[in-house]
Amino acid sequence: MNRRAVVRAVGVGALTGAAGCFSREDDEDDADDATDRDDVEPDEPDLEGVLRVATTESMVVGERAVGDWLREAFEEEFPDAELQWTVPEAGLEHYRRRVEQDAEIDADVYLGLTPPDLADLDARLAPETPFRELNDERLPATDRFRDDLAFGDPWDRVVPTGVRYSCLWYDENDLEAANGPEESSDDADEDDLEVPDALEELPDGAYEDALVAPDPGRSDAGLAFLLWVIETVGEDEFIRYWGELDENGLELTDDWEGTVTAFADGHRPLAAGYTTDAAYAEREGWETDGWEVVFPDERGYETPIGAAVFEDAVEVDLAYDFLNFLLSADIQAELAVRHSQIPALSRAFLDLDESFEDAIAVPSEPVSIGYDRLREELTGWRDAWANAFPVR
């Protein structure tokens, strides 16, 4: 069996998104676009050249970033290819500007896309898009995804490569102490010391000065928590609710790592984060005894992470095989541990590290806000939150 056959045998393809209202021009040229251009797999795919992959800073910057490992693994699998990372300073905003200016895109693939990213980009660029509709015939084995995992793009431009679930973390060793000596006494009402059963309980006095969370205006993890709040209390109530959190002593950090650090240091006994945080903390050598995950009302917010191919990609064949490579069983298992994400593939097709598998949790009822609603409302929600809670 040749190298390409091995990769395709373990690859996973794009999910077919639910019908949506993304307003691209509706004509026959668009309908036939995927067949007219070079997305149809050639008899002899060109797997030589430099594959330019745009991504987020967290993927390639820092001692524990996975960029170097992923590049080396890809180039070992495709010895005639070179993977070149690019991290645009302005993130996806860089590519929005390039599309608006009708300028050349300096990448073939974008890795690290989330549904809010795509919805926001589409809302600001419609009817244009920087990404191409994927040919799922070049992305086999679609039945290997986790149950009900879908990116939600109605135009099939993104293939999920992983997923994260928002949750609350509490430290059972510190929660009682945070409530003060009166509540911590033997005569205290034990209900005051329980972890919250619902997000609506977080503004209660029992959790005064207890919660730390990432800033929704500065991090994906913070935005996921904000969207979870909106999905839970409603778009008409989320500003009021957040104000109550603020009055109750909510502390915001600049990013996800800052929140995990504050929680691990015992600065706050309750944190909004991802279910993979304990696995990350253990790799950092932090003490996690007493860490417990809680899903209020058995729910947690789901954020798929995905990859897309640019419309103007030069190395199209390599781009498709890079997606297949990302979704191979070995790479999925390694990405889970190295990049703190839950694999896109079902566990039945994976051999996960035992310590990682023991450290992660998945909510009984994953929740999310769909693409159409994000595209219509996300900008307004962000603006309303930023105006109500300016940077301090």
Image (cartoon, rainbow, N blue to C red):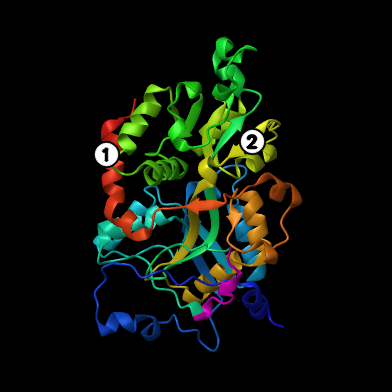
Residue 228's disc number: none
Instruction: Please state which amino acid type lies under the numbered disc 1.
Output: Ala
Question: Residue 308: percent from the left, percent from the top?
Answer: 45, 65
The quarter in which the C terminus is drawn is top left
Quadrant of the rendered image containing residue 176: top right
Residue ranking furthest to the bottom:
43
Q: Residues within 10 Å of mark 2 (few under 14, many from 20)?
A: some
Q: CA distance from mark 2 to mark 1?
A: 33 Å
Q: Residue at x 40, y 45 (%)?
A: 227
Count of numbered circles in the view:
2
Answer with left or right where residue 333 lies relative to residue 147: right
Question: Residue 203: percent from the left, percent from the top?
Answer: 42, 27
Q: Residue at x 58, y 61 (%)?
A: 344
Residue position for label 2: 292
> In the figure, 203 relative to 372: above or below?
above
> In the figure, 77 relative to 276: above or below?
below
| Magenta segment includes 141 | yes
Question: Residue 1: percent from the left, percent from the top?
Answer: 72, 83
Q: Which residues are magenta?
A: 137-146
Quadrant of the rendered image containing residue 181: top right
Residue position for label 1: 384
Which mark is first along the chain, 1 or 2? Answer: 2
Instruction: Please state which amino acid type lies under the numbered disc 2.
Output: Glu
